[in-house]
């Protein structure tokens, strides 16, 4: 088992994931452009590095948890990047949500250096990252997956090898369709009920045990009723994911009419100043259309 782990990207998700690795007894070397985030993780027991290259030089496995494909590509292949310092046999574990083609491209570049890469995006939001209960969907070689599985299990509850390189991020794209369209469906239902004048809390209790019940319903309805739109999963991140969904779908010839509509809803929310809000803010798009607010009775 790789003991010395590098971690690059200490944001809303990355920071608590890194802290869980420290709690599990791993030695961590970290790097992030946010000095405050780095300081907090260093105070918990990690050591800091000045570049991705330095992280790679000191690590047997390097985790990246970054916003988008361009950031992962820059950190892996850029000047003073991971590939400039990676050890032979080391494993890059990209836990970001990027496109399958970029993931496959980076895996091939890692292999040219005698190293390996797996894509291991997560689902479960900030609470899952904090509690170590993330669902982790992995793409890569079986033997590489097995070598780093204990690391992944320190951050997640359900860790599943889906297939070869690129399969993990493809599964994440499918996951994001289901999550975000589910929030949109919940939003339509809540706005209808609010405009009709019924007690939303009572309706929620009435339906949550039936077929309409879901993890999304239980996670987002209380937030919406409390008017709490502090991001666990922001509009920005989810819009990036659904943009990746549409790009990938169009490339392989899969029309996705509902996902394309969802992407327009995200763009409307960005224009309305909601970029940094939680994706539960999808409800506010519908509220504006119907001129009603979903709130406690």
Image (tube, rainbow, N blue to C red):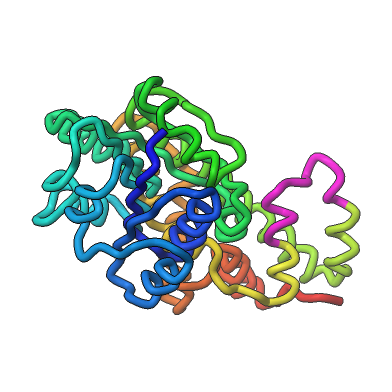
Q: How far across and how far down the image is residue 89, in percent?
A: 24, 30
Give whichever of 93, 296 is nearer the camera: 93
- Lateral position of residue 190 relative to residue 51, left or right: right
Q: How far across and how far down the image is residue 162, in percent?
A: 47, 26
Q: Residue at x 49, y 40 (%)?
A: 152
Q: How far across and how far down the image is residue 277, in percent?
A: 52, 72
Quadrant of res 225:
bottom right
Q: Is residue 253 above or below residue 30?
A: above
List the single residue furthest toward the left.
79
Q: Quadrant of the C terminus?
A: bottom right
Give whichever of 1, 14 is nearer the camera: 1
Number of numbered discs on residues: 0
Give whichever of 85, 130 is nearer the camera: 85
**Residue 210 painted magenta:** yes
Query: Which range of residues does the magenta coloring cover?
Result: 207-220
- Lateral position of residue 175 relative to residue 107, left or right: right
Q: Is residue 235 visible?
A: no
Q: Residue at x 32, y 75 (%)?
A: 35
Q: How far across and how far down the image is residue 274, in percent?
A: 48, 75
Q: Residue at x 40, y 20 (%)?
A: 142
Q: Residue at x 29, y 62 (%)?
A: 31
Q: Is residue 196 visible?
A: yes
């Amino acid at each position: 088992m790789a003991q010395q782990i590098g971690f690059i990207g200490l944001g809303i998700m990355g920071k608590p994931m890194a802290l869980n690795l420290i709690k599990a007894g791993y030695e961590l070397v970290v790097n992030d452009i946010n000095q405050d985030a780095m300081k907090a993780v260093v105070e918990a027991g990690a050591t800091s590095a000045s570049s991705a290259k330095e992280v790679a030089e000191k690590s047997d496995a390097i985790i990246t948890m970054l916003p988008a494909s361009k950031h992962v590509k820059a950190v892996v292949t850029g000047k003073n990047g991971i590939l400039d310092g990676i050890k032979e046999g080391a494993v890059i574990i990209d836990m970001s949500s990027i496109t399958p083609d970029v993931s496959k491209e980076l895996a091939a570049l890692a292999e040219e250096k005698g190293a390996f890469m797996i894509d291991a995006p997560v689902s479960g939001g900030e609470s899952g990252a904090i509690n170590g209960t993330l669902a982790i969907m992995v793409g890569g070689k079986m033997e590489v997956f097995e070598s780093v599985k204990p690391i992944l299990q320190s951050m997640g509850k359900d860790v599943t090898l889906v297939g070869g390189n690129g399969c993990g991020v493809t599964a994440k794209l499918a996951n994001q369709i289901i999550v975000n369209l589910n929030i949109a469906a919940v939003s339509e239902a809540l706005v209808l009920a609010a405009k009709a004048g019924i007690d939303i809390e009572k309706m929620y209790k009435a339906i949550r045990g039936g077929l309409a019940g879901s993890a999304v319903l239980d996670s987002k309805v209380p937030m919406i009723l409390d008017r709490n739109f502090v991001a666990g999963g922001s509009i920005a991140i989810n819009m990036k994911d659904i943009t990746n969904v549409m790009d990938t779908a169009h490339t392989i010839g899969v029309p996705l009419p509902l996902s394309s509509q969802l992407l327009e809803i995200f763009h409307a929310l960005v224009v309305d100043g909601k970029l940094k809000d939680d994706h539960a803010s999808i409800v506010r798009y519908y509220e504006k259309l119907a001129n009603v607010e979903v709130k406690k009775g």
